[in-house]
Amino acid sequence: MDDTRGAAFWQALSFTQSALPMAVYDADLRLLHANDRMGRITGRTEAQMRGLRSGFLPYDGTGDGTAGVDHAAAVDHATGVDRTADGVGAPAPAPDGKVEMAMRRVLRTGEAESLQTVRRAPGEPHARSWALSLSPLRDTAGRVYALAVTGFENSAQRRARASLALLNEASMLIGTTLDVSRTAQELASTPLPAFADFISVDLLDSVLHGEEPGPGPVSGDIRLRRVAHASAQYPDAPEAAVAVGDVDSYPEFSPPARCLATGRAVLTGPGDQAYTDWMARDPRRSAKTGDFGAQSLVAAPLVARGNVLGAALFTRRLHPEPFTDEDLALAEQLAARAAICIDNARRYTRERSTAVALQRSLLPRGLPAQSAVEVATRYRPADSRHGVGGDWFDVIPLAGSRAALVVGDVVGHGIHASATMGRLRTAVRTLADIDLPPDELLTHLDDVVVRLASENSGGGVGPDGAPATDEYTGASCLYAVYDPVSRRCCAARAGHPPPALATPDGVARLLDLPAGPPLGLGGLPFESAEFDIPVGSTLALYTDGLIESHEHGARTGRGMDTAPGSGVDGLCAILAAPSPSLEATCDTVLDKLLPPSRTDDVALLLARTRALDADQVVTWELAAEPALVAEVRERVAGQLAVWGLEELTFTTELVISELFTNAILHGRGPVQLRLIRDRTLLCEVADTSTSAPHLRRARIYDEGGRGLLLVARLTQRWGSRQIPGGKAIWAEQPLPAP
């Protein structure tokens, strides 16, 4: 090389005075010159480094053998992201071979290049990030004879990029569900192993239950429940001193309590006296110190919307560097983002618990004891996340051992539909207690829906000051009454699919029940129909969500069209097939008919009919004559003796006398007297009068008016119902204990 030419170059370049480390390499990549800055970084003189072939930050091979070698990177090959402690989320640095390849390429092509590397100089405890500039050096003839390497340290920028990458990754991986425990586990797993070796997440019990936590800060000792933890080295996380699900008490000087008291992350470790006192006070943690002692720990508060949720602990044990103030800020940001996700999950838990509690309170928790039918039910809301919907079913015991079977469907899903369903179910039960025929009951229920719709429209405000909604309130309903004495079923429907009947001979069909308009239209009539039902038959009442799918039937203004090949055919085929029980039949119906994804709620009620034996019912037709009262008493006493109910004779004679006398005084003959021995003893007197009886309080000198009051006091319950050609008054008494 021409020394004159070289000296002029170095002088022009101000090589020796540059604040950046610079070196010049020959065609064999051996160091020729290095400036003072390079010497200060490596701790060597230019003469000591001359002739070395180690690329940037030359190293002579002595010592631990790591200096001068590019930092080994744990690279995610799918994303090209470095997951090491120094470079979480940053582009992976080029290995030493890549630096050498780039230098040779510059010598060969004569074109300058730039690249990124992570190097640790001799004597430095940690590697640093460098941006390298490789520039060719040419002679007067334009030939490349050497290259200059200039390094610019960008460790701070790289750490900032790594922090942003980690926060971005956390935003994508934390909060993927609305489950508090799952979200906590995502916080414990995502920053491993780049940011910490072990992470634990502890929450207040109120957060797990969906309750509203108190505002921060929280001072004093605090009890937290371990919800999640994760280890970068061990799948079973043996570093944990507290098992998942257990509650631990943290004294006020412990890192978790301190961070919750200040609202800021706390950096601590073995050099902190408070940390040492905490370890000494907790035998479980002290026992872990020998094998899994932490070199550095950060406790970050989990605070969302001003409310304290818990704390997250980030621990470094094998990590090459302890936590820094920059890491403290990063831990706070991770905890803050995770806290919002945990609080969202907590709010969802609270709303879902409220919705489920509402739904459960509106649907029957247990079916009442009755002898008319054996029942099995299923309910599947379309809103599976909240578990609420607008479909409902009910079984209502009626007088005379009869049972009312109800299935209904409110338009829409969610809380609004569920609340409307609850009001309609209550209305149906109230109307059923009056013992109205099915068509009249639906007429009254239609009026209820019309009133509900008017309350939800018109631009008014509710009692809480909130504006009324314009959401449409409509519903469908099927109401059927089965009598185990006559073995007949009377039913009516309002915009609802007809029931299916499977008889014991294995034949299943839809009952030809007249279609009525949906509830809420107002002013349109409903029509009932009666059917003879063989004993042991199965009645299926269901909502349209069971039989409707993309290819199944659709709702019309007159009810439900059930074309061949629809879901109704599948339902009838299942009902006709042998089955070990009604419960098994319910399961089969849902398994076979429900599509993988559905948009409508499903309610199913299966009822297998029973009948009362002939010796459980006795009926007398009598003339409306006062002289027959004594005979009626004798007949009743004799029948009770046959049934072994002699101890009810006195009360029953009084009740029958009052009811029979009322029928003579206020009705027109003949009079029908019926006794039914079932779960209770029922006395029923029917006459041709249509006027309904009512209780009244007789004054001291009144000669009458005490009959029904006496009946009400002597019996378990009483009532009246309209029958063809008149009315029937009934009263029930509990049977004596066996």
Image (cartoon, helix red, strand yellow):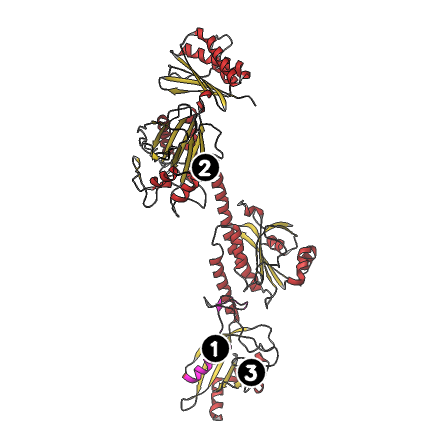
> Where are the magenta residues, as a range?
82-108
- Circle 1 is placed at which residue position? 98
How far is mark 3 from mark 2, CA to CA? 92 Å
* As drawn, 410 above or below 531: below
Mark sitting on residue 344: none
Q: Are marks 2 and 1 in contact (CB under 8 Å)?
A: no
How far is mark 2 from mark 1, CA to CA? 73 Å
- Circle 3 is placed at which residue position? 36
Residue that lies at the very extreme toward the front in this rendered image:
505
Looking at the rendered image, the disc whose residue lies closer to the viewer, 3 or 1, is 1
Looking at the rendered image, the disc whose residue lies closer to the viewer, 3 or 2, is 2
- Circle 2 is placed at which residue position? 581
Q: Residue drawn 53% across and 61% down?
A: 191
Locate residue 577, reporting x and y percent: 39, 39
Looking at the rendered image, the disc whose residue lies closer to the viewer, 2 or 1, is 2
Looking at the rendered structure, the kind of residue marked 1 is Lys
Q: Of callouts 2 and 1, which one flags the residue occurring earlier in the amino acid sequence?
A: 1
